[in-house]
Image (tube, rainbow, N blue to C red):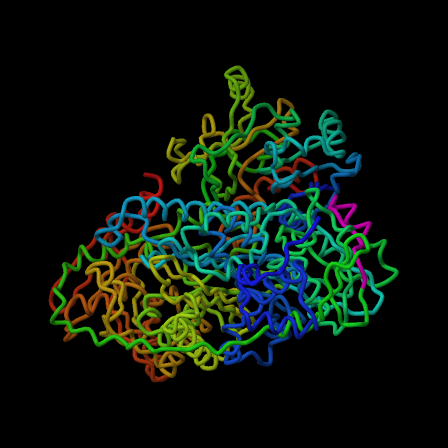
Amino acid sequence: MKAAVIRFPGSNCDQDCMLALREFGVDAEYVWHKETSVAAYDLIVLPGGFSYGDYLRCGAIARFSPVMRSVVEEAAKGKFVLGICNGFQILCEAHLLPGALVRNRSLHFRCEHLFTRVENFTNPWLNTAVTGQLLNIPIAHGEGSYLADPETLIQLNRNRQILLRYCDSHGAVTHAANPNGSLENIAGICNARFNVFGLMPHPERACDPRLGSVDGRVIFESILTRLGVRKAA
Amino acid sequence: MTEPAITPELIAKHGITPDEYGRIQSILGRDPNFTELGIFSVMWSEHCSYKNSKRELRKFPTTGPGVLVKAGEENAGVIDIGDGWAVAFKMESHNHPSAVEPFQGAATGVGGIIRDIFTMGARPVFSLNSLRFGPISEKAAAANTEPATLATNRRLFAGVVSGIAHYGNCIGIPTIGGEVYFDESYNGNPLVNVFCLGVLKHEQIARGAAKGIGNPVFYVGAETGRDGLAGAAFASRDLTEESKEDRPAVQVGDPFREKLLLEACLELLATDAVAGIQDMGAAGLTCSTCETASRGGTGVEIDLAKVPKRETGMTPYEIMLSESQERMLIIVKKGHEQTVCDIFEKWDLPYAEVGEVKDDGMMRVLNEGRLVAEIPASKLADDAPLYEREAKARPLPAELDLATLPEADVHRSLLDLLAYPSIASKNWVYRQYDHMVRSGTVVLPGSDAAVFLIREANKIVAATSDCNALYCSLDPREGARIAIAEAARNLACSGAVPLAVTDNLNFGNPHNQENFWQLRESVEGLAEGCRAFNTPVTGGNVSLYNQSPAGAIDPTPTVGMVGLIADEKHVTTSHFKSAGDVILLVGELGDELGASHYLKVVHGRKEGRVPRMDFGRELAVQEAVRALISSRLVRSAHDCSEGGLAVALAESCQSGGSLLGAQVDLGQTGLRLDQALFNESQSRIVVSVTAQNASAVQALLEWRGVSARRVGTVGGEQLVIRCNGAETAWSLTELHGAWYDSIAKVMEA
């Protein structure tokens, strides 16, 4: 099992993702955005940051990086692709995930610990969690408000592709608990095959108890379990 | 194209006095041309030369066993943190640019300080900032303040915060702490002081010297444009109504470019290709060429035709004085040119070989082979005139006469203090900063000091910035002494041992004798503090001319202090942890109400004698608390500062996210109630300990000769303070409502 952390110019959570993966004993490597193949990897991580300065629109330029053609091809073959924050934005721009992420409702960047609720655990990304479980994972974004047309939303709900929703500390999905104005408090979604997952919260920042929460681990544990490098608990 | 003739008017317009012009003539042995005049004007500005402050700065202690790079030697000081690792850190101001263009002014301030750190070969790991604005709400302003002034202050505050967020978030360096104060004296002249710390191994320290005759000189990074022309000179003048016209002197930042530049430079520095490296900050290409030559004892020759440019038709004057951002000058070891090319190609950054190191000590500037400037580099860099300005002492304020002070309702007063923007929670600010990227923020913003785990080195570093300018305005020496002591106290409360200091001296026009006296008193006060706490000054910045038509700012010698936490188990935060814990006040109950925020906020009076700072007592208190922390006896520690004991207790009830009440009994104090609750006597720390350990902790403190008293217990839905037989209670919701949302309510209204 090998994992790739893609480095776009302007990625800045690449080192944090690498650290989290290596803490789990994963053989992970950085892949520069000018590379043309990620076929050698079983898990492909698009980290957070400001790829290309987020100029034009978040992720809009990064999707044209040479490496993305291969990411799209590998995703089509069923390889696992995880996009965190800016990585989620890039996956939407590359049409690997439906919908778009737009400016936060408050118009401000927001960085804080908050809760998301696991909406579905029958997938590769949350199989070690349970539905309804609360995850305390920090967010840090200026453009994380998830938008999609009504048909897409119906599809996402019907197929249970919405994996995480923002909620309060009691698990209630409320307007007040929504940090950015996302439709239906959406924090993370999958594609229809469940092999591509994008989320705005940063699970890699919630793996070390010294940083206040280890709730991000469940996502890494789940995908590593699915990949067979970790035994299910 | 013909250059303007050198006339007395043109010389004066460049801020050069007739005496200074004479000095230039004797250095050159002739009259300077237009380009050379421009070069001298920026290099001999206060911002670059410290000509008005250097004699004072020499009073700082700058050496110590851990100092690897001293103040003034390079772009930033470097301090040993053990196991072969070191930290480079520095604080710098961007006050003037932020006054006329808050977003870009603040953003480029962040960019500049980050470059200073990676120029040293260090990877920047976190930032802090220290901000000052005029009042933002009617309630917190003087009675007759114009609504337009408040609106301007809010615009500046919002702009500066989003500028810092824009740059820091994008480049991926967490902004994990700092301070924000509001006071009338900053109307029209906000202060934006930014701090950055980076980590490196001892052998990675890079030098800004042009070594090796014949070595090629490379320009890397963004193209040069007409932005920021002569910004250093702009920063060395008073702000006036016309300053808006200086907006072209404000640079435009591109954090994405800087992120690439940062990664490319660190990649290059990891090779063996670099002989010297220097960022282009204030005074741009001018400063970087003459300083590297001066440090190297060499000369540097560059050809401006080879400099990557953003615009056509730029004159040599403009190219030399441009302060376009995200640029570096690199002296490359001959034969290693290809390494530079490969790395900068990889990162898609412009680069060009623009000249070479010479043996004649000259800074020689050509344009397409034609000589446009030729100046002895060391004389330009190091021989700026030094001035001993006249100082005139301002009488120290008289002791506050309590009889003239009506006793305000303490219930209302505490809520007013907590809601006062300088004291209120800064969550509206730090939520806009990515304060968790790099996965090292062990203590989130809002505690006494920022605490960061530097994973590369496996070290935990604490950092804080402090300055109570209200104290400094009334007694600059005592205020400066307290700034150092408070910084050290904040570190002690976090479990850290202070290592070193960077300072940012923000003052008014030094030609005003009282302003210069404030500068001198503050420097001497800081120096005394640094010696007392054994924390050398490793660098910093001087920002004078902080003066609007309404007058000078309150003297603001901001202190950035860095400390080390020996063990992750020693990391301590300011908020109460569990009901039933015992609250102790380490230090005296105190009685000094002079210069307090209670006087200012509740009574509208900036007066009275500043609290006395006894370093011996302060050190004893700090060492005692640190020892208790090391023995793992302390559950929370929070120092008493603005607003005194009552504010410290109220903050400890709520700063951790969840709310915890407290029952406090101060007994019969012999003081007025407001005096007991809100006095700002120094050297006091509120700690909480488990009930089981309380007696042992008291005994340990007694054994150390540090006075301490048991003042209450944690728990309940209220903060209750009994004092002199009276009881005052605040519900947690009213405390939280006052403190937590105060700034957001004003800014989002």
Residue B542: say if magenta: no
> Does residue B454 appear to the left or right of B530 in the view shown?
right
In magenta stretch: residue B345: yes
- Furthest-right residue in view? B335
Nearer to me, B631 or B571: B571
Nearer to us in this view, B459 or B357 = B357
Image coordinates of residue A92 in percent, x first then y, are 61, 28
Does residue B690 appear to the left or right of B11 in the view shown?
Answer: left
Which sits in the foreground, B184 or B559?
A: B184
Q: Is residue B168 visible?
A: no
Residue found at x 37% / y 34%: A176
Task: Look at the image and give the residue range highlighted in magenta.
Answer: B340-356
The relative height of residue A90 versus residue B115 in the rendered view (above or below) is above
Question: In percent of the image, x 50 and y 57: which residue is there?
Answer: B94
Q: Give coordinates of residue B167: x percent, y percent.
A: 55, 48
Q: Position of residue B155 (x, y in %)?
A: 39, 44
Quarter of the image where the C terminus of chain B is located: top left
Q: Is residue B158 visible?
A: yes
Location of residue B618 with respect to B327 vertically, above or below? below
Q: Residue at x 50, y 58 (%)?
A: B128
